[in-house]
Image (tube, rainbow, N blue to C red):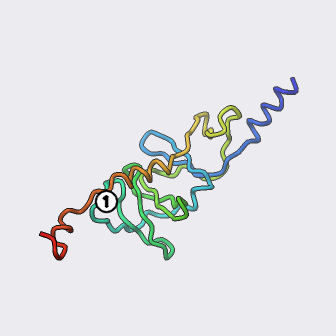
Amino acid sequence: MRVEAERESLKTDSKRAGVLVRVEETLWFLPASIAVRVASAPRVTPFPGAPPELLGIALHAGVVLPVIAIGPLRAEMVICQHGGELVGIVGGSVLRSGSFDVPAERPDLIEYLGTRVHPLDLQAVYSRVQGGARPDVSALRSFPGRQ
């Protein structure tokens, strides 16, 4: 009986801070260790030759950061820390920020209104963007000394 009470206590006492985002019909969680802040969608300057997910670069609080799309919306941006640098993530709608319950048997997830939510794998998103970079062939043709 005591063990069961301790398990219940763990279920209700275990919390994880972060930002909950809806991208189309899917919920994603950005832990506070990654999510720095939520800001209005910035003015983005496209980056020639970038993959479609890399919308471009934006200026935020005096810092130039890449802006990556994870969905179609552009209303707000979650500024994240990745590899020691800031990255802007757009494409979803922020539902809530704060502390969320963590299921005792799945500490990698959070619960929100009875739904278990996976963390957004920012490393995978960033890697996909880096791997999808396309060379700008027209720039190479016009480069001095190239024919």
Residue 70 left/right relative to 102 = left
Closer to us: 30 or 124: 124
Closer to us: 53 or 91: 53
Residue 51 left/right relative to 10 = left
Q: Classify mark 1: residues with Cα within 10 Å, few (<14), some (14-19) or many (20+).
A: some
Residue 80 left/right relative to 42 = right
Name the amino acid, label 1.
Ala
- Tell me if residue 30 comes above or below residue 56 in the rendering: above
Residue at 60%, 53% in the rendered image? 97
Q: Position of residue 46 (x, y in %)?
A: 31, 65
Q: Quadrant of the C terminus?
A: bottom left
Q: Position of residue 114 (x, y in %)?
A: 61, 33
Label 1: state its secondary structure.
Answer: loop
Residue at 65%, 34% in the rendered image? 106
Badge count: 1
Q: Which residue is mark 1?
A: 50
- Tell me if residue 84 comes above or below residue 27 in the rendering: below
Q: Position of residue 19 (x, y in %)?
A: 58, 52
Q: Quadrant of the N terminus?
A: top right
Where residue 103 sits, quadrant-wise, is top right
Where residue 107 sits, quadrant-wise, is top right
Residue at 28%, 57% in the rendered image? 134
Residue 33 left/right relative to 67 = right
Where residue 54 sits, quadrant-wise, is bottom left
